[in-house]
Image: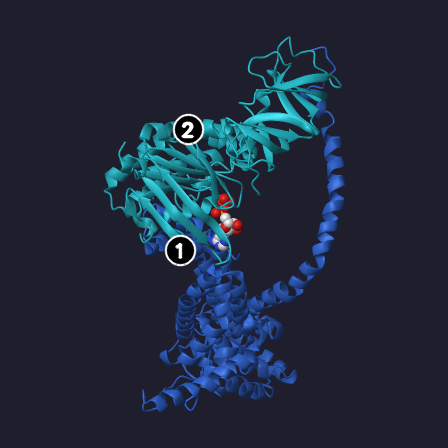
């Protein structure tokens, strides 16, 4: 062609330049957008991502021997766990214990070893004291003479488990397992198996709370969505009212209601329905009732907002096509409200799995949940690694459940509004 | 035709109020014959949907009775009325495929599987959407969705189908195409259709008869031709088609022809109004019934006006003249050599026959 209309070829000549210009023009916009969200990103980083990774890191990080007796730890790592260690390991451990005693770290080391195998604290402190006076060079014979426990495989397995910087022992403990003397993973003794039971109980209570929230919340959300706005606004305020009062106050109110001399029991006794007060507080009933009450709005809100967006015309269409009201509701309305309901239910379930205050206040002994155990390890036993591992396994369980849900229903089906 | 066939659907003195204060529908009477295509036409808010909803059973009349096939239906639940319905926004169930949507009315009627499949296929073929069975409504265009909605309203073979502004969400071209499609299907299946629209041209092209609504009252019930040619009051004349209006007082009436005083001039028009002399009325005449020059047969009104605007429309020319104090008087002149010479500023002789001009009651709206 002889016209001056640019062809595809001579337009492409400009391309690199054009791209550069485009990038330049967009860079400014991008930077501005980034600056706007920067405070949020930093906030999330410092309040969420950083603490969470730190916590998860603690659940596998195990520096106690590597930091305090590096040479001994390196040797033990190589030990095969088939027969007792040789003189080289005995002498390194012996010397290291002496140094640890001088540096006053022997207590911490002993404590940590003790949590792998009981009796290790007294063994290490006692031996360290005696070893301080030992000047010979046959540590193996001397230590075996000091205490026969130095000749047991279990003792050395405890060292072996802690000899590497990263360890799965906390996670094993969180699932009621441990390493045996041969370094194999075996279940904990029966009397020390508590965490799996606790996890199962937590899942059971959370499921109950979720089911009750669905049973109570779904009809209410429906009512809210069909009432004229003057009435539904008032009702919505009542639904949200619990958010305006402190969690502590609301939970304590349930104590007043449900304790053995509380309002409910007094009323039932007075009416002659029961002859002895029911145990509704400081057990699982108390936990479930109070948590259902507290978490109910989290189910109602997403369900309501999805229901609000379902046009009544669908029900009309279904009725005109010959469906009874019940059939139309089940086949046409319910499936459309499901994204909101399942989003709300998942929210309630995940919130209740990690719930702490309510079980702590009203759960008594039997109504405790796994977060109460985590708090115990964080605050009382100071076994942060185990606490972190429990929290980590909770996170894993939630992710697995979410994955299953995603498989069955599809996360794209979730709607929070 | 028997009485039942003339009154397949019958509204008898139906009233409806939602709030106990305002009557949304007042004294509504309408008989619809079997197989007829009747349209309720009126501006938004005039109570058309309310009437349709009462017929479908989603609203109950405050007073009066509705009969379908001779049976009073006021106390029959919607799902037992066997009425097909089409809604403005399609109302296809978003969580079901097209086939499931169509199968729904058949499944609630407990039809066998093979029969359901057979009928769904036939209904989809009817609206030329074979092969779309497994799509979701969202994956179809507006026009396709509306065709599915039509198929769904017909698949269970109801003898009465209601349509509430079904084409309102479509663009103009698609709307016209769907109008013909619905019309053809109506002719083929012989179902009775009650159609609601606020679009007068849609009503004119599709309907056997049209009920023109305003303020909850039927202003006129007539064939499209009757409505256009013989509107009974100012509302209908204004609402249907284009219309030139002159306001004046009745001076006298004789043999159905009255003479009006408009701006000091005397105009002859067909007396549709029964009002006595001295009443203010409205004279209405269609633009295409007005001619230039006074040499035509049967012309008994002729006035001089000045041309304000000429717009070329190809087959015709639209001329706006100022006449009798009204400067929005429109003429539609066929595009011929005779009318080619009109230009802005000319003085022209504007004329019409009193048979085409109608003196109408002025109704408030
Ligand atoms: N469910 C309802 N509640 C109260 N008022 C309504 C309701 N539906 C319609 N209306 C009122 O009734 C009047 C007629 O409405 P409608 O029948 O929808 O008119 P149209 O379909 O002709 O536009 C309107 O003024 C509208 O506000
Ligand atoms: Mg309407």
A103 is higher (above) or lower (below) than B186: below
Q: Position of residue B146 (x, y in %)?
A: 44, 36
Residue B191 appears left or right of A33? left
Residue at point 59%, 79% (across, down): A95
Ligand 2 near label 2 (Cβ, under 8 Å)? no
Residue A317 lies left or right of residue A20; in this view the side is left
Image quadrant in which the C terminus of chain B is located: top right
At which x and y percent is residue A293? 47, 74
Q: Give the number of the mark in front: 1 or 2.
A: 2
Residue B67 appears in the figure:
yes
x and y percent of residue A397 in the render? 45, 64
Q: Nearer the viewer, residue B234 or A92?
A: B234
Residue shown at the point (48%, 50%) measured from the top left: B24
Q: Nearer the viewer, residue A221 or A204?
A: A221
Specify whether residue A382 is in view. no
State the mark number for residue B41.
Answer: none
Q: Which residue is mark 2?
A: B181
* Residue at x 48%, y 79% (from the top left corner): A359
Say whether mark 1 is within 8 Å of ligand 1. no
Residue that label 1 marks: A334
Label 1: chain letter: A
Which quadrant of the rendered structure holds the N terminus of chain B?
A: top left
- Percent x, y for residue B147? 42, 34
Chain B's colour? cyan
Chain colored blue: A
Structural distance between the alpha carbons of marks 1 and 2: 34 Å
- Under circle 1, the secondary element is helix
């Amino acid at each position: 062609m002889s016209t001056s209309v640019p062809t595809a070829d001579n337009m492409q000549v400009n391309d690199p330049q054009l791209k550069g210009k485009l990038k330049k023009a967009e860079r400014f916009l991008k930077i501005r957008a980034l600056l706007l969200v920067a405070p949020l990103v930093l906030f999330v980083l410092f309040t969420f991502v950083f603490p969470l990774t730190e916590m998860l890191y603690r659940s596998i990080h195990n520096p106690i021997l590597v930091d305090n007796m590096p040479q001994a730890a390196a040797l033990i790592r190589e030990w095969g766990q088939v027969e007792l260690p040789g003189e080289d390991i005995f002498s390194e451990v012996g010397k290291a214990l002496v140094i640890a005693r001088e540096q006053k770290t022997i207590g911490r080391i002993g404590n940590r070893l003790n949590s792998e195998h009981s009796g290790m604290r007294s063994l290490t402190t006692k031996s360290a004291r005696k070893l301080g006076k030992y000047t010979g060079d046959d540590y193996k014979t001397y230590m075996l003479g000091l205490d026969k426990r130095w000749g047991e495989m279990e003792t050395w397995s405890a060292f072996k488990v802690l000899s590497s910087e990263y360890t799965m022992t906390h996670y094993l403990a969180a699932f009621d397992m441990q390493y045996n003397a041969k370094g194999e993973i075996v279940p904990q003794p029966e009397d020390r198996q508590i965490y799996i039971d606790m996890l199962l109980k937590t899942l059971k209570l959370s499921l109950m709370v979720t089911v009750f929230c669905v049973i109570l919340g779904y009809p209410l959300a429906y009512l809210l969505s069909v009432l004229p706005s003057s009435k539904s606004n008032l009702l919505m305020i009542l639904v949200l009212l619990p958010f305006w009062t402190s969690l502590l106050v609301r939970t304590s109110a349930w104590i007043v209601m449900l304790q053995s001399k509380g309002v409910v029991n007094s009323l039932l006794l007075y009416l002659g329905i029961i002859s002895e007060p029911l145990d509704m507080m400081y057990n699982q009933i108390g936990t479930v009732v109070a948590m259902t009450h507290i978490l109910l709005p989290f189910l109602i809100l997403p369900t309501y907002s999805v229901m609000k967006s379902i046009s009544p015309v669908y029900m009309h269409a279904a009725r005109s096509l010959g469906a009874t009201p019940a059939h139309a509701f089940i086949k046409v309305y319910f499936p459309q409200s499901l994204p909101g309901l399942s989003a709300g239910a998942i929210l309630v379930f995940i919130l209740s799995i990690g719930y702490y205050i309510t079980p702590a206040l009203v759960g008594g002994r039997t109504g405790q949940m796994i977060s109460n155990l985590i708090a115990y390890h964080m605050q009382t036993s100071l076994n942060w690694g185990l606490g972190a591992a429990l929290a980590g396994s909770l996170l894993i369980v939630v992710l697995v459940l979410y994955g299953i849900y995603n498989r069955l229903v599809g996360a794209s089906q979730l709607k929070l509004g | 035709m028997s009485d039942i066939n003339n009154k397949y659907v019958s509204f008898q003195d139906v009233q409806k109020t939602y709030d106990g204060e305002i009557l949304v529908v007042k004294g509504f009477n309408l008989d619809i014959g079997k197989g007829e295509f009747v349209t309720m036409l009126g501006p938004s808010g005039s109570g058309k949907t309310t009437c349709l909803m009462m017929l479908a059973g989603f609203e109950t009349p405050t007073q009066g009775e509705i009969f379908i096939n001779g049976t009073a239906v006021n106390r029959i639940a919607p799902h037992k009325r066997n009425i097909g319905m089409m809604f403005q926004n399609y109302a296809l169930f978003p969580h079901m495929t097209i086939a499931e949507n169509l199968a729904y009315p058949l499944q609630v009627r407990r039809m066998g599987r093979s029969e359901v499949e057979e009928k769904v296929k036939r209904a989809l073929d009817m609206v030329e959407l074979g092969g779309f069975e497994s799509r979701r409504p969202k994956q179809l265009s507006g026009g396709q969705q509306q065709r599915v909605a039509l198929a769904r309203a017909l698949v269970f073979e109801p003898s009465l189908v209601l349509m509430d502004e079904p084409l309102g969400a479509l663009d103009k071209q698609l709307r016209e195409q769907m109008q013909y499609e619905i019309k053809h299907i109506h002719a083929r299946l012989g179902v009775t259709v009650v159609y609601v629209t606020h679009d007068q041209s849609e009503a004119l092209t599709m309907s056997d008869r049209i009920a023109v609504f305003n303020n909850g009252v039927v202003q006129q019930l007539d064939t499209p031709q009757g409505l256009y040619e013989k509107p009974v009051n100012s509302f209908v004349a204004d609402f249907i088609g284009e219309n030139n209006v002159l306001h004046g007082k009745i001076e006298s009436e004789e043999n159905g022809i009255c003479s009006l005083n408009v701006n000091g001039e005397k105009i002859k028009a067909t007396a549709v109004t029964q009002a006595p002399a001295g009443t203010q009325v409205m004279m209405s005449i269609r633009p295409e019934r007005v001619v230039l020059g006074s040499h035509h047969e049967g012309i008994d009104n002729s006035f001089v006006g000045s041309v304000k605007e000429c717009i070329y429309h190809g087959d015709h020319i639209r001329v706006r003249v100022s006449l009798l104090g009204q400067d929005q008087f429109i003429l539609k002149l066929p595009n011929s050599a005779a009318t080619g010479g009109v230009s802005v500023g000319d003085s022209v002789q504007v004329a019409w026959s009193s048979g085409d001009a109608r003196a109408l009651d002025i109704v408030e709206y």
